[in-house]
Image (cartoon, rainbow, N blue to C red):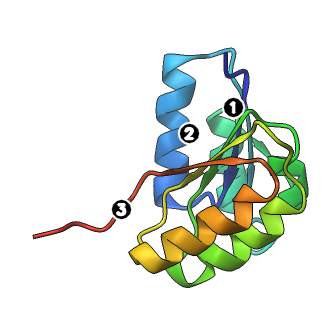
Amino acid sequence: MIKHVGFIGFGEAGSNFSAGLREANPALKITAYDIRFPLEPALQTKAAALGVTAVGAVDASIAEPDLVFSFVVAKASVTVAEASAKVMRAGQIYADCNSSSPQMKQQVAAALEGAGVKMVDCAGPMVA
């Protein structure tokens, strides 16, 4: 059972996802990290209004949760996954919700595999 969810990135997608999770499960613990929190206080206010704990370091948002959602720009997805793998523990789930190429998705999965983290692709590219 998932009791704690963490977010990397709290822009439009991350905050909307959080809102849906909060509505579905008011008791769920949700933490979020966004590099823009210090620069955009309105984002922290939005997080608080959703019952999401805004944290000042990515480690604080991903070390404990059962499930981590990554909502970052595509070009940062591999770098973020590599950094996350150093903090996460075996058995956690990492949901890559970034719109990136299949090759980048494979790199994200490879970065997390060594840490025993399970990767789920939530935003695979569309195929015609």
**For the point 71% across and 57% down, which residue is it?**
113
Horizontal and vertical percent position of residue 52 = 71, 38
Between tags 2 and 3, which lies in front?
A: 3
Specify the quadrant of the image occupied by residue 31.
top right
Q: Which residue is mark 1?
A: 51
Say whether disc 2 or disc 3 marks the residue closer to the N-terminus: 2
User: What amino acid is labelled 1 in the image?
Assistant: Gly
Say whether disc 3 or disc 1 marks the residue closer to the N-terminus: 1
For this view, does 12 lie left or right of residue 118?
Answer: left
- Crowding at mark 2 (Cα within 10 Å: few <14, some 14-19, many 20+): many
Q: Are marks 1 and 2 in contact (CB under 8 Å)?
A: no
Query: Secondary structure beneath disc 2?
Result: helix
Between tags 1 and 2, which lies in front?
A: 2
Q: Which residue is mark 3?
A: 124
User: What amino acid is labelled 2 in the image?
Assistant: Ser
- Crowding at mark 3 (Cα within 10 Å: few <14, some 14-19, many 20+): some
Query: Secondary structure beneath disc 3?
Result: loop
Horizontal and vertical percent position of residue 14 = 54, 52
Seen from the viewer's position, the closer of residues 78 and 115 is 115
Seen from the viewer's position, the closer of residues 92 and 71 is 92
User: What amino acid is labelled 3 in the image?
Assistant: Gly
**For the point 72% across and 59% down, which residue is it?**
112
**For the point 40% across and 78% down, which residue is it?**
101
Which residue is situated farthest in the left direction here?
Answer: 128
- Number of callouts in the render? 3
Query: Secondary structure beneath disc 1?
Result: loop
Q: Which residue is mark 2?
A: 18
Seen from the viewer's position, the closer of residues 48 and 17 is 17
3D distance between C-alphas at marks 3 and 1: 29 Å
The answer to whether any part of residue 40 appears in the image is: no
